Amino acid sequence: MCENCQKSDLSKLTPILEEFSGDKYALISILQKAQEIYGYLPTDVIYEIAEKTSVSPAKVMGVATFYTQFRLQPIGKNLIMLCKGTACHVNGADSIERALIEELGIEDGGTTEDGLFSLKTVACLGCCSLSPVMMINEDTYGSLTPEKAKEIVRNIRLESK
Amino acid sequence: MKIIIGEGSCGIAAGARKVREALLNQRAQSEQKLVIGKTGCIGMCFLEPIVDLYTDEGQLLSRLVRVKESDAKRIYSAALDGDLSEVKDLVISKDDASFLEKQTRIALRHCGLIDPEDISAYIASDGYKALEKTIKSMTPEDVIETIKISGLAGRGGAGFPTWFKWNAARKAIGEVKYLICNADEGDPGAFMDRAVIESDPHALIEGMLIAAYAIGASKAFVYVRAEYPLAIVRLEKALAEARAKNLLGENILGSNFSCDIKIKAGAGAFVCGEETALIESLEGSRGMPRLKPPFPAEKGFTNAPSNINNVETFANVAWIILNGGEAFAAMGTETSKGTKVFALTGKVKRGGLVEIPMGLTLRDVIFDIGGGIRDGGTFKAVQMGGPSGGCIPEHLLDTQIDYKALASTGAIMGSGGMVVMDEKTCMVKMARFFLDFTAKESCGKCVPCRIGTKRMHELLVNITEGRGRPGDIELLLELSNGVKAGALCGLGQTAPNPVLTTVRYFKDEYEAHINKTCPAHECEALKKFSIDAQKCKGCTMCARQCPVSAIKGEVRAAHVIDQDKCIKCGACLALCKFGAVVSM
Ligand SMILES: Cc1cc2nc3c(=O)[nH]c(=O)nc-3n(C[C@H](O)[C@H](O)[C@H](O)COP(=O)(O)O)c2cc1C
Ligand code: FES
């Protein structure tokens, strides 16, 4: 275990590890549930999962870094997933991305200083007929224009003040 | 009268849940309580949110489109009074209604018609009859024979005959056999599988159970991509309902056939759509493809015989069992039988889900059903098959939808993504887009794919950013052939296709880029800014703000941009109050 990494409340992992105990193929499901709890995958959580599932930390880390769903850093309160799939690309996703970068002052993968927003581009949200599309937390916003995208972000910022 | 709201992901994204709330509000205020129900994706995504008015007997009276929350009051009262004149302006136009009328729906037979969260709605429309027929009156060999007669081929992309895989898995030796449904749907621009699961989850379950019976599998998985939360919720509910009715689990319908289905959520990796990578992922590992053979039919999940099919493939199965293989084979062409679902998107007027018999032409789908190009644009190309596919140009629009015919264009049938592009889409940038995608999604196991796609992407970045050199096209082709020949799995073997097809049909665009112009005016770095002398007032604003002093001119006289100095930042364009700066 590393010495100076963060101290997460590992007791929250117990029910998950119990649910999947004996299922040696459940690593991805365990990581998904752990991320639901902590919002991301802290290092000590990764070590704990490795130890309790008898999988090497290297393998757990390997899986956690292979799949785009997993995060090793905490994210902002609102996760913006901007689609850059084919349909959205054809319908101007690049200009939406520029607008969001301008409005938020962060690049793809970044989090704003106030911790309100994280921006992540994804490959397709399956709502291609409404392209360009973005998802903020659970809500999907379609038929975006650069202005509309900025306004949506501004409204969320106002609401959380 | 009953009010039914279309609540697939697209409907919800367009505001269907808000419309529902507003309608529920109306009902709360009203003496008479009408039924307010829901259905899945009707497939007319361009008209969402959609509200259907049905008679109590279940006959569709009227379809209202692009409904807003503020329409709830008049919709509720129209439904109460049975007087549709109050909502006349919302009724779907004849032209738009033809979008559905020209389709033949088998895989989508219940989509948009039944409540996906209510098993009794599925049962009432002949649901689980095929399963009953299978278990009670057919041997596994009968099932495989029926599928063979139907000519059903895998809808996940490769189009491999379904019966053949089932037969191989049936014949394989193993105590436990697995059935796996591939619902990873990684092709960006495709959403057929999502729509089927969200709108008709029992059709998938029934198809899977029949397949499990045929191959002798007692355990099954559905591998759903993580980006589809609603599909997972609906499928979970459907599985629970089926289990409660003994349609799933131990001794199904009192027989000695047992099979249970579990959901596994993917974690975001395109390569996991490839069947052996999917198996690795199911086993909790990094999704890196295995060398084939052995094929999954011999050694799949946990090295046991396994059979993998796509969602749409399964969604056809119950229909085929009920209607006979011949009925399915009667549709289509010599080499491609039945129907295929497409996700029609991009610059098309009417985008959505289209299911048509094989053998129609691309023109039929894009122009007849899709209504052609929107905003007065002209058709340039259609992209089929996603990152593994290619772009088909205008002169090939009369190509039939048929595995062989499409493959001869250099594209593929693919899983059903059909992204339409107009003259404003730059084809080189399109190729760059796909190579960016495959380079990022390459799992890194084999060198030709890991490095080859990266190098190809670099070349395409250079070309689109004005650093293209003579010989780049030839180099791209050479790399393409190398990656195709050397890659381990389908991802790398097909990754060059977007480049190969665009070079084949749009070589002039590549050449133009190398000569520093983008014919579609899409590539930022190749844009040219100039000042319209008629409109320029000589206010000097642009000249003062230009970061590289590329603009010269006297006060109150027209200004000029020095093209050699210009860095194309666009500052002048944004600044000019007189609209004198133009970008080309
Ligand atoms: C890179 C790659 C991605 C794939 N993605 C998918 C996918 O998202 N969905 C799918 O059904 N098949 C996908 N396939 C095809 C599968 O490997 C497999 O052939 C298919 O699931 C078999 O089902 P079918 O015979 O019913 O088509 C992909 C193949 C490759 C090479
Ligand atoms: S391409 Fe953006 S939602 Fe599908």
Image (cartoon, helix red, strand yellow):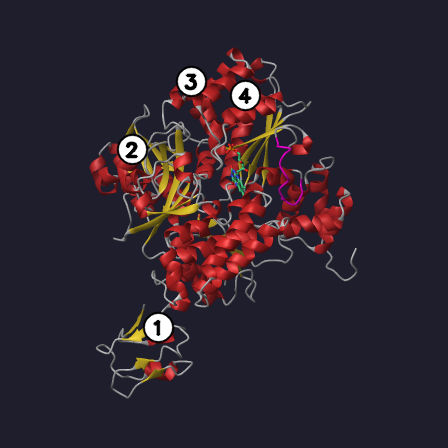
What residue does disc 3 label?
B324
Q: Amino acid at mark 2?
A: Lys
- Helix, strand or loop at mark 4: loop
Tell me which label, 2 or 4, sits earlier in the chain.
2
Which chain hosts label 2? Answer: B
The mark nearer the N terminus, 2 or 1, is 2
Q: Is residue B201 at least partly visible in the picture?
A: no
Same subunit, tags 3 and 4:
yes
Q: Which residue is mark 2?
A: B102
- First along the sequence among labels 3 and 1: 3
Identify the residue at the far bottom of this view.
Answer: B554
- Badge 1, how many Cα within 10 Å: few under 14, some, many 20+? few
Q: Chain of mark 1?
A: B
What secondary structure is the magenta-colored segment mainly?
loop
Q: Chain of mark 3?
A: B
C-alpha separation, residue under disc 4 versus residue under disc 1: 63 Å
**Sequence-earlier tag: 4 or 1:** 4
Magenta segment range?
B284-296
Is B223 situated above or below B454? above
Q: Amino acid at mark 1?
A: Ala
Residue A52 image-quadrant placement: top right
Q: Is residue B244 above or below residue B312?
A: above
The answer to whether the residues at label 3 and label 4 have Cβ atoms under 8 Å apart is: no
